[in-house]
Image (cartoon, rainbow, N blue to C red):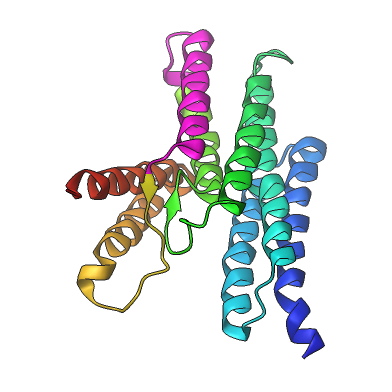
């Protein structure tokens, strides 16, 4: 029983270690593909720690806090560092990409709200931080092509700053976002999730890592459409 009680927290620590390793790989080796893969691995651990905790009925306040602390690193700081390194590799100056660190700050704010909000048991209010991370991984993969297409580097930099503002706002906003924690297995209950999974598969098969950004935008669009249909 004691081992079962600690199993979800052990998985959460794997999330944290994977996210931390992503930062090391990005800065020490400059291998952004491997770093992005480690963040995706963190997302897998993040999915399973909650799943295991519910299956074993061992959820705890400490586990919830530990999960949020791990998520700040894996889905806030890690994608910020990966994006900063990607922009450095393109030749941007030391300081111009640093506003990307706001991603980590707003991820922390979003998780602090989540931990103290009883409304977010089966759905989310504001963009979940793993979705935020996936957006930035997709943008990182698109960055070299966007750099070639941009009329000048300043235009790309402004675009990145706009994305920082938009994603930071979405994380702390009051916009309801659906989750995969649904009651029942009817198509009516799952249709948004099915559309999201299907669309994401198409985007990723078509564009690779770059498709992740479109998947997150689709998720936001489906959530906003759901909100607007409510009376």
**On screen, residue 206 above or below 108:** below
Percent x, y of residue 13: 77, 63
Q: Main secondary structure of the magenta part?
A: helix
**On screen, residue 36 above or below 149:** below
Percent x, y of residue 154: 52, 9
- Indicate the quadrant where residue 66 lies: bottom right
- Indicate the quadrant where residue 83 lies: top right
Percent x, y of residue 41: 63, 60
Was residue 159 drawn as part of the magenta stretch in this picture? yes
Residue located 59% across and 55% down the image: 40
Was residue 137 drawn as part of the magenta stretch in this picture? no
Residue located 60% across and 34% down the image: 106
What are the residue bounds of the magenta stretch? 148-175
Please tell me which residue lies in front, 85 or 111.
111
Q: Is residue 161 left or right of residue 15?
A: left
Percent x, y of residue 179: 41, 60
């Amino acid at each position: 029983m004691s081992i079962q009680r600690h199993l979800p927290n052990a998985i959460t620590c794997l999330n944290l270690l994977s996210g931390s390793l992503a930062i090391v790989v990005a800065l020490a080796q400059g291998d952004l593909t491997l770093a992005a893969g480690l963040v995706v691995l963190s997302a897998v651990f993040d999915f399973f720690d909650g799943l295991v905790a519910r299956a074993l009925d061992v959820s705890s306040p400490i586990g919830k806090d530990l999960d949020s602390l791990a998520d700040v690193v894996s889905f806030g700081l890690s994608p910020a560092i990966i994006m900063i390194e990607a922009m450095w590799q393109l030749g941007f100056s030391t300081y111009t990409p640093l506003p990307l660190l706001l991603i980590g700050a707003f991820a922390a704010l979003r998780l602090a709200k989540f931990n103290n909000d009883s409304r977010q048991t089966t759905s989310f209010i504001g963009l979940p931080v793993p979705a935020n991370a996936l957006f930035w991984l997709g943008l990182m993969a698109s960055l070299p092509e966007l750099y070639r297409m941009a009329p000048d580097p300043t235009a790309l930099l402004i675009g990145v700053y706009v994305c920082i503002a938009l994603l930071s706002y979405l994380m702390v906003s009051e916009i309801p976002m659906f989750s995969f924690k649904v009651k029942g297995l009817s198509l009516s209950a799952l249709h948004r999730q099915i559309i999201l999974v299907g669309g994401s598969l198409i985007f990723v098969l078509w564009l690779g890592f770059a498709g992740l950004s479109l998947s997150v935008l689709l998720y936001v669009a489906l959530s906003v459409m759901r909100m607007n249909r409510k009376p």
